[in-house]
Image (spheres, rainbow, N blue to C red):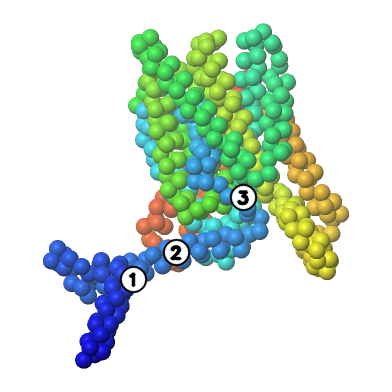
């Protein structure tokens, strides 16, 4: 009897322990069906909801895996060094906000107060097209595309590749040129304040050398993103200086200023300035590729676009309210000559543009180096150096790797041209040489065309509107024509039509102003 009681007590303890273990391991499931008195949902419906949430989580994880696998396996020239979301945010603000701050108040003086409406409209369109462009890199592709030329090739063949590459080239080369023009003028004026008078052309070469030395030594997007943080800080300082001065001058200039609600004939060329103020699409694919978490791109871009729009509205409205139709471009030229505020504003603006130039030229250099096979060659040499100790211990494996490298050299070379093979054999020298040539080319153009306002209008109407609004929408319509959503395709068509209209009329006005300034000096 006693033995039977002992066995029964042991069996009950085992059953209780087993039940406790089952409950402890199944806590999430029990949490979803407990408190039935507090929730009217039936247990069967709750089970369906839990299953639905589980499937959603699995699909989200699969999308992240698919994005990473497409990006990493499809393009060997993508950046290896990753950057954080904060660094990406600073880079976007650095690329987008610089020129816009200098030109937005003058665009308001051309269009009138209705420019605020077009500015907000441009910000919404820029956010939509910026996300759309990144989607084009992955949609229906076995590998991640690198940018506008490859998207154009995938959608419209060779013609699309030429168009996408041409507009990208124009923006990547002329935007640094525009910055060098501005920096050269500012340095010449700042040096004259301390009694040192140097010609603008000499200052242009000084500025180019100042930018060229660190740019020639940058190797990854992380190096460029480090510069963009300080450029963003310079942007904040410029906004503070101009807003404080504009508020202080408001009462003094109130009686002498003239404002318009709308100037219809100037809206297209003003819209080109708004477009250029949000133009960063040519760099967005490289920024997205260098992110640690690429699925966060829409959120990061939204924060950047909202921040830049707030800065533009604050800067443009206050300066236009204080100075009216007398606002100039760059905006700090509206300030009295020789004032301390003008000197501080020029200094801060110069720092910003000098730090922003490497961002554009890096993307252009990256494309050229990838086309020549220099970047892959340099990465392979770095990998061989990192595993050098292991190869020394296994000589046979070293000989095999060497044979593979020789085969890769044959595959990388796009032709039997000995010049390209020489460039591939010396990747570091090639990289520095290409960057020096780019800086010299931009400086030469800056010396020949010293018209900041006209160059900015031309870039905005020809390249910025095409890359920011027109091409992303046309590419997406082509890619998702069969499986895309109707409302999305309609929005893309409307944006493309508006962008084309403003680009056509804005280009005509910008060319007229440029020719007028060239003829009259």
Which residue is denoted by mark 2 in the rendering? 61
Q: Gap between marks 2 and 1, in whole Å?
A: 23 Å
Instruction: Please state which of the two labelled residues, at mark 2 or mark 1, is closer to the viewer.
Output: 1
Q: Which residue is mark 1?
A: 25
- Quadrant of the image for the N terminus? bottom left
Question: For the residue carrying disc 3, how many other residues have a C-alpha within 10 Å: few (<14), some (14-19), or many (20+)?
Answer: some
Task: Mark 2 or mark 3: name the one nearer the start of the chain.
Answer: 2
Instruction: Please indicate whether residue 341 sits to the left or right of residue 361 in the image.
Output: left
Query: In front: 478, or 356?
Result: 356
- Residue 454 on image: x %, y %: 58, 28
Of residue 104 and residue 141, the one placed in the foreground of this image is 141
* Separation of marks 2 and 3 at Cα, in angstroms: 23 Å
Residue 375, visible in the rendered structure: yes
* Residue depicted at 22% across the width and 69% down the height: 33
Residue ranking furthest to the right: 418
The answer to whether 306 appears left or right of 83 in the picture is: left
Residue 398 position, x and y percent, is: 81, 64
The residue indicated by pointer 3 is 81
Asked which secondary structure carries label 3, the reply is loop
Q: Does 289 sit above or below residue 90?
A: below
Q: Earlier in the sequence, mark 3 or mark 1?
A: 1
The percent coordinates of residue 471 (x first, y second) are 52, 50
């Amino acid at each position: 009897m006693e033995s039977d009681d002992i066995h029964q007590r042991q069996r009950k303890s085992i059953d209780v322990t087993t039940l406790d273990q089952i409950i402890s391991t199944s806590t999430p499931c029990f949490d979803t069906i407990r408190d039935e008195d507090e929730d009217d949902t039936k247990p069967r419906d709750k089970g369906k909801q839990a299953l639905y949430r589980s499937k959603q989580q699995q699909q989200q994880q699969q999308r992240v895996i698919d994005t990473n696998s497409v990006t990493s396996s499809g393009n060997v020239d993508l950046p290896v060094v990753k950057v954080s979301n904060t660094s990406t945010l600073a880079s976007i603000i650095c690329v987008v906000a610089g020129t816009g701050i200098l030109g937005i108040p003058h665009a308001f003086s051309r269009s009138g107060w209705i420019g605020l409406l077009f500015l907000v409209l441009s910000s919404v369109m820029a956010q939509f097209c910026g996300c759309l462009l990144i989607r084009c890199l992955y949609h229906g592709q076995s590998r991640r595309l690198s940018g506008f030329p490859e998207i154009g090739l995938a959608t419209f063949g060779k013609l699309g590749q030429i168009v996408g590459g041409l507009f990208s080239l124009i923006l990547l080369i002329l935007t640094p040129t525009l910055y060098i023009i501005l920096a050269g003028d500012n340095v010449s004026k700042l040096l004259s304040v301390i009694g040192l008078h140097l010609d603008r052309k000499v200052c242009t070469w000084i500025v180019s050398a100042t930018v060229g030395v660190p740019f020639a030594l940058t190797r990854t997007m992380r190096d460029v993103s480090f510069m963009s943080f300080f450029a963003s800080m310079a942007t904040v300082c410029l906004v503070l200086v101009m807003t404080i001065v504009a508020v202080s001058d408001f009462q003094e200039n109130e009686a002498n200023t003239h404002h318009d609600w709308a100037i219809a004939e100037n809206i297209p060329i003003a819209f080109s300035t708004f477009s250029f103020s949000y133009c960063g699409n040519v760099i967005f694919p490289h920024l997205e590729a260098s992110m640690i978490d690429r699925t966060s791109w829409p959120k990061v871009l939204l924060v950047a676009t909202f921040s830049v729009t707030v800065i533009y509205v604050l800067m443009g409205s206050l300066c236009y309210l204080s100075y009216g139709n007398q606002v100039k471009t760059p905006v700090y030229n509206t300030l009295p000559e020789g004032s301390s505020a003008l000197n501080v504003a020029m200094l801060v603006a110069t720092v910003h543009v000098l730090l922003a130039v490497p961002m554009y030229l890096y993307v252009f250099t990256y494309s050229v180096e990838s086309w020549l096979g220099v970047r892959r060659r340099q990465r392979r040499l770095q990998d061989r150096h990192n595993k050098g100790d292991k190869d020394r211990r296994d000589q046979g494996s070293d000989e095999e790797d060497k044979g593979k490298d020789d085969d890769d050299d044959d595959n990388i070379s796009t032709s039997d041209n000995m010049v390209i093979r020489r460039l591939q054999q010396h990747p570091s020298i090639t990289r520095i040489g290409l960057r020096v040539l780019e800086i010299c080319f931009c400086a030469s153009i800056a010396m020949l065309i010293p018209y900041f306002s006209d160059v900015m209008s031309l870039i905005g109407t020809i390249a910025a509107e095409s890359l920011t609004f027109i091409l992303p929408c046309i590419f997406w319509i082509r890619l998702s024509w069969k499986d895309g959503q109707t409302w999305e395709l309609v929005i893309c068509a409307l944006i493309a039509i508006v962008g084309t209209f403003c680009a056509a009329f804005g280009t005509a006005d910008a060319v007229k102003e440029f020719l007028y300034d060239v003829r009259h000096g």
